[in-house]
Image: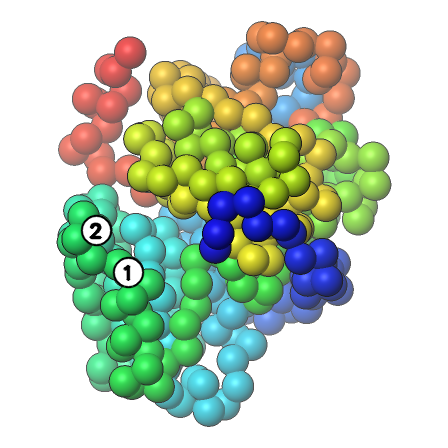
Amino acid sequence: MIPGTLPDYSLLDAVTLDHIRAAAGRVAPFVRATPVLEDPHLNALAGARVLIKCENLQHVGAFKFRGACSALTNLSGAARAAGVIAYSSGNHAQAVARAAADLAIRAVIVMPADAPRIKTRGTREHLARAPEGSRLVTYDPRTESREAIAGDIASREGLTLIPPYDHPDVIAGQGTAALEFVAHAGPLDTVFSCCGGGGLLSGTAIACRSVNPACEVIGVEPEDGDDATRSFRSGRLAVAEHPRTIADGARTPYLGRYTLPLVLRHASDMMTVPDRELIEAMRLVMDRFKQVVEPTGVLGLAGVLRVARESPARLRGRTVGVILSGGNVDLEDLPALLSRR
């Protein structure tokens, strides 16, 4: 997409509450209903009741499985027979590979050669269960374009592209996490959602605000990958090329054709946090909840902690929801990551 592009608000009807409910019905046999946790220490820090939705415990360790499963279960018969292709640095790759294996659909996954080892390994393991012809294709992100590689393979082999976030069925699938959240916890006053390409944020805002129209839904990005925040402020597409952040799942350069208007219309606010605050949030989750999370996975929680420090009245007395979006971190790298300052 071109920087400065205006949102196409005619696309807003592509993802509605009805689409999210339909996706929830399709994915129910495959996804895991993840727990909601609470901790008095975190509540005291935030000055609010903070509920944590553990999508790090979802299949493949991330909410991305919901979107992939939603898209693959909604394919036509011909598209299922031909197979799918996806590109991703990690969690979407694993998600499509796992969904394809579960649904017996051939899948080709395009991943950068320097993707986190845990995500590459998981993708290979799931593809091993998928139908014949499924495979992993790696590329050099410094010299090659994943979109071009995937487009070429899709054209030659007749595959359907399942993009990481900019697809109505993917967005609707991501929204099922929030739909499940409010069904478990009841209406939420404020929700903090990580934002990379905007799929989870879009689906979360639609689902939560349908239950409580007054719900404030805040998207949280890495400080060095602030394209969605700048887009939200300006009302036009902003770009962050090659953001330098430990949150590898949020290194997307811009919002998509669908997610740009959805975020601008349904999100209440956007904010950013520096990498050091992601590490603080990871430590808190591991200490208080005994959960392994990746840096991208705690973007929402880091947002809660920053708002609690800087604008405590904004949260005081409210019921706050946070989705821990993923837990795929290389355990060998974890000690060095947590010791960074």
Give percent across and percent down for residue 102: 39, 72
Residue displayed at 72% across by 45% down: 265
Residue displayed at 44% across by 25% down: 223
Q: What's the mark number on residue 245? A: none
Query: Is 160 located above or below residue 241 in the figure?
Result: below
Judge by depth and name the residue closer to the eye, 10 or 214: 10
Q: Who comes first in sequence, dot 2 or dot 1?
A: 2
**How many other residues sit within 10 Å of disc 1, few (<14), some (14-19) or many (≥20)?**
many
Quarter of the view holding residue 313: top right
Judge by depth and name the residue closer to the eye, 51 or 269: 269
Quarter of the view holding residue 51: top right
User: What residue does disc 2 label?
Assistant: 141
Query: Would you say 18 lies left or right of 28 here?
Result: right
Residue 109 shows up from this direction: no
Query: Would you say 335 lies left or right of 217 here?
Result: left
Quarter of the view holding residue 35: top right
* Secondary structure of the residue carrying numbered label 2: loop
Residue displayed at 19% across by 22% down: 336
Q: Disc 2 and disc 1: Cα gap in Å?
A: 8 Å
User: What residue does disc 1 label?
Assistant: 146
Residue displayed at 28% across by 20% down: 338
Query: Is 99 located above or below residue 250 in the figure?
Result: below
Judge by depth and name the residue closer to the eye, 254 or 115: 254
Query: Would you say 190 lies left or right of 5 here?
Result: right
User: How many numbered markers are drawn?
Assistant: 2
Give percent across and percent down for residue 242: 31, 39
Give percent across and percent down for residue 216: 73, 32
